[in-house]
Image (cartoon, rainbow, N blue to C red):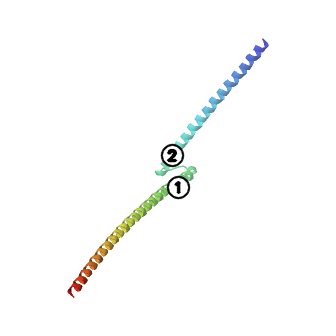
Amino acid sequence: MAFLDKLNKMAKVIEDKTADAIEFSNYSAAITAGENGFAMDIKKIGEFYYEFYVNGGTVEPNILAVLQSAKAHQDSIAQAKADIERLNAEIAAEKEAAKAERAAAKEAAKAEKEAAKAAEAAAKEAEEQVEEIVEEVVEAE
């Protein structure tokens, strides 16, 4: 019987420790949920005051420096985005110019090749005419 009593006491201790662990876990989850909710609410308050400040609202002097810093960060982000757009436009323009230059060079090479063919044909025709004249002169003698 003593063995069963010890076994029951151990089961009770395990049950109590498990209940405590579950209770601690529930409290920890509640704390985490509360902290996350608080952080989201504080963020919303900050966004509200930032928009209020940017739209010309008057704010307390002790928060003004933080709002000005946030505005400077936003301005910096906007400038960097504009610089990226400008750089992308320059790169696109350079690519188009290079493409046009390659096309013009290709056309020039094609025209040069056609001119060389025409010159070769003209030279061949001239050579044939010279041969005909030489034959006529030789026959005439």
Q: Residue furthest right?
A: 2
The quadrant of the image that shows the N terminus is: top right
| Labels 1 and 2: the sequence-earlier one | 2
Under mark 1, the amino acid is Ala
Q: Residue furthest top?
A: 1
The answer to which quarter of the image holds residue 119 is: bottom left
Query: Mark 2 sits on what residue?
Result: 47
Relative to 19, residue 95 above or below: below
Query: Mark 1 sits on what residue?
Result: 72
Residue under the point 36% across and 69% down: 109
The quadrant of the image that shows the C terminus is: bottom left
Q: Is residue 140 left or right of residue 55?
A: left
Q: Which of 105 and 26 is in front in this view?
A: 105
Under mark 2, the amino acid is Glu
The image position of residue 99, as x and y in percent, is 39, 63
Residue under the point 27% across and 79% down: 126
Relative to 83, residue 59 above or below: above
